[in-house]
Amino acid sequence: MRKTTLFLGATLLSFTALLPAAARAHIRSMDAGACQPYNANGVRGYQCGLVGGDDYGVPTTVYFDYNASAGSIVDLYFVRTTYSGSISSDTMTPSAPYTGSYDAALYPSTTIQGPSPYDYYRALFITNNSITVYGVALRN
Amino acid sequence: MRSNLVVALIGSLTGALGALAVAGLSSAREHAPHAERAAPLAPPPSGIVPPGWNPLFVAAAAHAEAPPPPSAPAPPATGPARGEPDEKERGRQEHYAQELEYRENELASHDSESVDGAWAHGETATIRQTLSAGERSFVVKSVDCRTRTCVAELTYPTPSEAVNGQASLATSIPAGCHGMLSTLTPPTDAGPYDATVVYYCR
């Protein structure tokens, strides 16, 4: 009886101690050094490759950190390419005044359907002007 | 005393394993063996060729799946038998089947929407304008907007062109929409190929 109680107590203690740490949201951030200029079919900006995989789960928020000069309209894209060839993307355009530092949050809806740990992710800053990209972060 | 310590230790380990299992972190990682690749004979497609596509309909894929030269090393004895897909490739095939099913469901959902005439007319024009901008390898066959979503049908000269055109579609979502999805269906020949893009707008 005593040993059973001891066993259950130890099990409960370690379970409750580890579960919050194991189940908490993960954040991975990428410095602008992981980004490169993007120019395709007249669409210009910067793109950053992001880390996927099974350590993180489905992204719920994508943070785009950048500084825009006056008159810069920046369209933000989060693109998923699956390893079986499908492509999907979510986009948003931060509201005016379109200048200064942004820490814009995009909440994916299309790109999180049918996830696979082999999915590839990209974040793109599409702009008509020059901007300074600081980095990108993903939260799951 | 010592037996109590052992029991407590076993209990702690059991609890820790339970926590990891609940958090979904206990699944073993799969390390797929490096795929054997033939020497490139032509530039590879810029997009990912879906699994199971007939190589004859996608020229570049035919090179990727060509048999290795005689001097190529034999596959490791522990790997899958030649010609048999490994675990990752089987997963890719299953995932593609799920994506095709999801695509069908999304198109059926679009078809079941009622038509908001005023919005649909304006958004259709916007999508046509966006898809026609710049150099494109496709022609816009049709655009159909309802209440929440729009579906555009694009005709490419070949299935290969459709594979290569996927990426640019993802970064040119028309104003008024916030998301897109494109899953290419298996081609029936190497000629003109119709692709369908779903736009999520409201």
Image (spheres, rainbow, N blue to C red):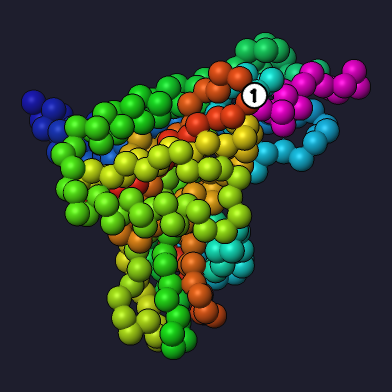
Q: Residue at x 54, y 48 (%)?
A: B167
Q: Is residue B72 magenta?
A: yes
Give coordinates of residue B86: x percent, y percent: 59, 20
**Residue B156 appears in which quarter of the rendering?**
top right
Residue B196, relative to residue A26: is it above or below? above
* In front of the other: A29 or A12: A29
Q: Residue at x 8, y 26 (%)?
A: A1
**Residue A10 appears in which quarter of the rendering?**
top left
Give coordinates of residue A124: x percent, y percent: 49, 62
* In front of the other: A66 or B121: B121
Outermost residue, right side: B71
Give coordinates of residue A125: x percent, y percent: 48, 67
In terms of secondary structure, what is the magenta stretch mainly? loop
Instruction: Name the residue that disc number 1 marks.
Output: B190
Q: Which residues are magenta?
A: B58-73
Q: Is residue B186 left or right of residue A99?
A: right
Q: Residue at x 38, y 47 (%)?
A: B180
Q: Is residue B37 magenta?
A: no
Residue B89 in sight in this render: no
Give coordinates of residue A54: x percent, y percent: 43, 41
* Amino acid type of the residue that numbered disc 1 sits on in the rendered structure: Ala
Residue A15 in sight in this render: yes
Outermost residue, left side: A1
